[in-house]
Image (cartoon, grey):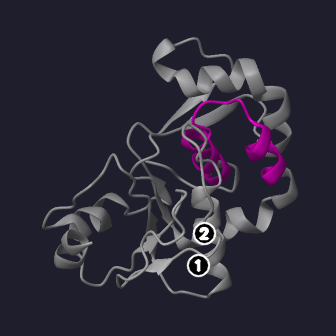
Amino acid sequence: MDNIRKYNPQSKVVLYNGGKDPEFGKGIDIDICPYSRPVQVPNLGRVFYDVMRWLEESNIDYEFLINFDSDIMFVNPGFETFLLECMKDYHCMSLWMRKIEVECNDPWLWPAYTLWYEGWEKWNPFFQTNDYIIGTLNAMQVYRREIIQKMLNRIDIEKLEELVAKTEVYAIEEMLYGTLASRNGGKGR
């Protein structure tokens, strides 16, 4: 928190308490997403959705939503300037964001592989992309508010809840939001 506040003093941090300690994060000056609930790695699929939904319901003004997780612990001076430059003309960005065709067999893309072979028939009607997904690394996903609003307006929340609760797909969060952004006209980097 000190690191983010030092180098990005205008930013707002929202904690998603995905652990079993309901007191985690309380007592420090930070917003805690009220939709937080225990999550189990490798299924973090609902975390970003819960934060997006809460930000919109609360009408909190922001330009970018960035996912920091345990893979990313610190930001450096110049992060905000870097982000503004990188996001020019883009709606979303992440490490290794790329289009992945159906049934890609690259073993490096393990989450996509598990989606194709364990859950595509369940997830495809939700994604509505038919022959591709957008794969990313979960940490450092960045989305502009305008694409988040489009995504939220088209999400079938009941279907999402059902899919996330039952999925066997490894790290669905690494395909879920990039694909939804793409489906809604988002330009990714």
Residue contact at pointers 1 and 2, CB within 8 angstroms: yes
Mark 1–mark 2 distance (CA, rounded to whole Å): 5 Å
Residue 114 location in percent, x, y? Answer: 65, 22
The residue at the point 56 percent across, 74 percent down is 33
Q: Is residue 30 left or right of residue 143?
A: left
Q: Which mark is residue 52?
A: 2
Quadrant of res 37: bottom right
Range shown magenta: 160-181
Q: Nearer the viewer, residue 89 or 184?
A: 184
Residue at mark 1 = 55
* 164 in magenta: yes
Give SS at disc 1: helix
Residue 97 location in percent, x, y? Answer: 46, 40
Circle 2 residues within 10 Å: few <14, some 14–19, many ≥20: many
What kind of residue is marked 2? Met
Q: Is residue 116 above or below residue 90?
A: above
Q: Is residue 180 left or right of residue 140?
A: right
What kind of residue is marked 1? Leu
Farthest residue, direction left: 77
* 107 in magenta: no
Q: Where does the N terminus fall, quadrant-wise?
A: bottom left
